[in-house]
Image (cartoon, rainbow, N blue to C red):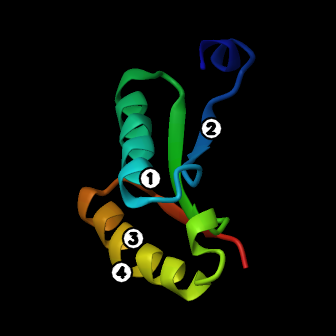
Amino acid sequence: MHSMLRQGVTTVEAKSGYGLDVATEIKMLEVVQELQQEEKIAIVSTFMGAHAVPQEFKQKREAYIDLVVQEMLPKIVELKLAQFIDVFL
C-alpha cells in the first residue's frame, strides 16, 4: 500500500472471493475494513463470493448460489463489509 501511495495511487479495490465459505469471506472483508481505517490510501471493498464454485458444490451448484444469496450476502450487508458485489456468470 505504501509503495502504491508513493507512486501516486489514491484508490485500490480489494475483493474477497477466495474463501468461498461464509466465515472466510467475512474474515477477508473484515481485514479490508481494518485496513480502510489504518491506511492513507482509499480502499474500496467488493464481495466476490460467487466468482467460482467450491469443489464440494461442483455437483450441486444451485446449493452454492443459495449459500451466497441466503447466508453470505445478508451477513455482509448486516456487517456493512462491502461497498460493491461482483459476480461471475
Q: Which residue is mark 4?
A: 70
Q: Which residue is mark 3?
A: 73
Occupied quadrant, residue 62: bottom right
Q: Which numbered disc, 1 or 3, marks the residue that appears first in the sequence?
A: 1
Classify mark 3: helix, strand or loop: helix
Where is residue 14 shown, x and y percent of the image?
57, 43
Classify mark 1: helix, strand or loop: helix
Q: Which numbered disc, 2 or 4, marks the residue that appears first in the sequence?
A: 2
Where is residue 11 shown, x and y percent of the image?
61, 36
Amino acid type at circle 3 is Leu
Amino acid type at circle 1 is Glu
Which of the pair 85/59 is nearer the observer? 59
Distance between the alpha carbons at the discs numbered 1 and 3 = 10 Å
**Quadrant location, the C terminus:** bottom right
What residue is at 29 percent from the left and 65 percent from the top? 75
Amino acid type at circle 4 is Gln
Amino acid type at circle 2 is Val
26 relative to 88 in the view: left or right: left
Q: Which residue is mark 1?
A: 25
- Neighbourhood count class around disc 1 (C-alpha, 10 Å): few under 14, some 14–19, many 20 upward: many
Q: Which numbered disc, 2 or 3, marks the residue that appears first in the sequence?
A: 2
Which of the pair 20/30 is nearer the observer? 20
Distance between the alpha carbons at the discs numbered 4 and 1 = 14 Å
Classify mark 4: helix, strand or loop: helix
What residue is at 54 percent from the left and 27 percent from the top? 41
- Of the two numbered discs 4 and 3 in the rendering, the one whose residue sits closer to the viewer: 4
- Neighbourhood count class around disc 2 (C-alpha, 10 Å): few under 14, some 14–19, many 20 upward: some
Q: Which residue is mark 2?
A: 12
Which of the pair 18/45 is nearer the observer? 18
Q: Is residue 25 visible?
A: yes
